[in-house]
Image: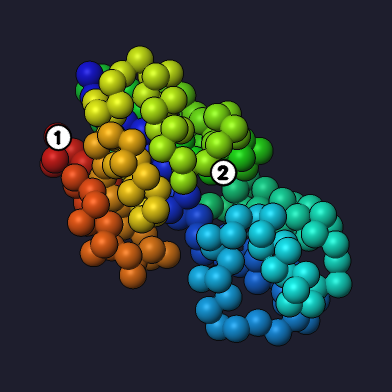
Amino acid sequence: MKTYLFDFDGTLVDSMPSYCACMLRILDEYHVAYEADVIKTITPLGLLGTAEYFVELGVPLSVEEIGHLMGEYLLDAYKYHIPAKKNVVETLCTLKEQGASLNILTASPHITLDPCLKRLGLWDLFDNVWSCDDFATTKADTAIYKMAAQRLGQPVGEVLFLDDNLNADKTAKAAGMQVCGVYDNSSAEFAEEIKTVADLYIYDFAELLEKE
């Protein structure tokens, strides 16, 4: 039985456009000027770091207030708008029918993750849906991949991890997992570097079935 461990944002769902829109909405609502590449600046910061950065830019709210706004805007996007990426639903259904174990490990919190999966009809396909919160660490820590494999009852080298993020792919590989890089527009500039780290690389989820 093949065991898969999927990232969520940018891997299973096309969430980066909505994430960017939610972040820029806050800056625009408070008429705060920002550089054209502000999204590239804030993407690695996480919500807390982004809120702190927005205070520095001049948003007239506290970090806590900005964080609350982010949560409100993002929850709406995940509950009602964010789509699955091309061929994700069909591919996951086929893998499930073939007897694969499908699992998620993401930095996204359950408050946005779970309703999005349920709306897209994907929730019941997964054996485990994990946020980094469930492990009290991040995907920048090799330990999280080892703990996930342990919970899956598999040697770490028998799990295939799929992510569009270069750093996550590097860390999973360092932990001993098999790695499949996934193309996303938001990380396109790192595609070639991800290919040097990963065992596989896909531009479209349908390619997973061809590689089986």
Q: Quadrant of residue 79?
A: top right
Q: What residue type is labelled 2?
A: Ser
Residue 113 location in percent, x, y? Answer: 57, 39
Q: In this view, does 46 lie above or below 79?
A: below
Labels 1, 2: front one? 2
Which residue is at a point 28% across and 50% down the rendered structure image? 181
Q: Is residue 125 left or right of residue 114?
A: left
| Residue that label 2 marks | 108
Q: In which quarter of the image is residue 62?
A: bottom right
Which residue is at a point 20% across and 56% down the rendered structure image? 196
Residue 204 location in percent, x, y? Answer: 26, 52
Out of 90 and 27, give the one closest to the viewer: 27
Q: Quadrant of residue 132?
A: top right
Q: In this view, does 208 lie to the left or right of 74?
A: left
Which residue is at a point 79% across and 77% down the rendered structure image? 58
Q: What element carries label 2?
A: loop
Quadrant holding the C terminus:
top left
Callout 1–callout 2 Cβ contact below 8 Å: no
Which residue is at a point 26% across and 62% down the rendered structure image? 193
Q: What element carries label 1?
A: loop
Snapshot colouring: rainbow
Residue 93 visible in the current orientation: no
Residue 122 location in percent, x, y? Answer: 45, 33
| Residue that label 1 marks | 212
Quadrant holding the N terminus:
top left
Out of 73 and 4, give the one closest to the viewer: 4
Residue extending furthest toward the top: 153
Out of 53 and 161, give the one closest to the viewer: 53
Residue 41 visible in the current orientation: yes
Q: In this view, does 33 lie above or below 178?
A: below
Out of 77 and 70, give the one closest to the viewer: 70
Q: Which amino acid does label 1 sit on?
A: Glu
